Image (cartoon, grey):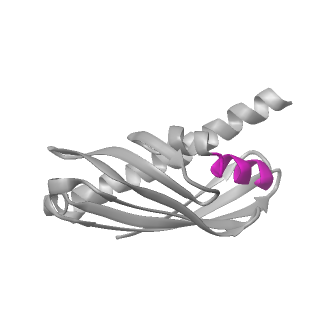
Amino acid sequence: MKLTGERLIPTTRQVVWDTLLDPAVLRASIPGCDMLEKKDDENFEAAVTIKVGPVKAKFAGKVTLSDLVQPVSCTISGQGNGGVAGFAKGGARITLADEGDGCRLTYDADVDIGGKIASLGDRLFRGVVQKNIDDFFNAVAARVGADSLTSQ
């Protein structure tokens, strides 16, 4: 399943970059994130609870930051196993560009699921994935806004 989107964030590209790569921000911004533990500069262990329709499952897995081109682009990818609920894996290529006084964040995501959670149907799952992606980037944008207001 492919999803794309963009946001105009009213701060500098460097501030958005630093915020996106902050482990505390990632943990607070990933919907349903129960745990995010940094293993090294690019790898994290994670536990995320996801609810899709009547199925609620806890996924344990890892999150990886790769293709880091500071402060222009990166890839955030993850994979997790939810036991009988199934598996989820995916990634998002994130690109940052200056636009006026702000930063244009663009993402191109690809998500794959299998198991019981996949049996609920692509349409239902697509809505949940899109909402989670929107919630993630909205949380990052809100954090950037809060940080830029307090640092002025």
Q: In which quarter of the image is residue 6?
A: bottom right
Q: Measuring 79% from the left and 60% from the top, which residue is drawn there?
A: 98
Q: What stretch is highlighted in magenta?
A: 13-22
Q: Measuring 69% from the left and 40% from the top, which residue is drawn there?
A: 144
Q: In which quarter of the image is residue 24?
A: top right
Q: In which quarter of the image is the N terminus?
A: bottom left
Is 62 on the left-hand or right-hand side of 8? left
Q: Check residue 147 for magenta coloring.
A: no
User: What is the x, y in percent for residue 13?
Assistant: 77, 55
Q: Measuring 36% from the left and 65% from the top, which residue is drawn there?
A: 89
Q: In which quarter of the image is the C terminus?
A: top right
Above-or-below relation of 23 to 41? above
Is 117 on the left-hand or right-hand side of 105? left
- Name, please, the residue furthest toward the top: 150
Of 38 and 125, nearer the camera is 38
Of 4 and 140, nearer the camera is 140
User: What is the x, y in percent for residue 27?
Assistant: 52, 41
Q: Quadrant of residue 83?
A: bottom left
Q: How many marks?
A: 0
User: What is the x, y in percent for residue 130?
Assistant: 39, 55
- Name, please, the residue furthest toward the front: 39
Of 23 and 97, nearer the camera is 23
Above-or-below relation of 100 to 149? below
User: What is the x, y in percent for residue 15?
Assistant: 76, 47
Of 88 and 11, nearer the camera is 88
Is 21 on the left-hand or right-hand side of 54? right
Label the magenta part by its dominant secondary structure.
helix
Above-or-below relation of 1 to 60? below
Is 108 on the left-hand or right-hand side of 60? right
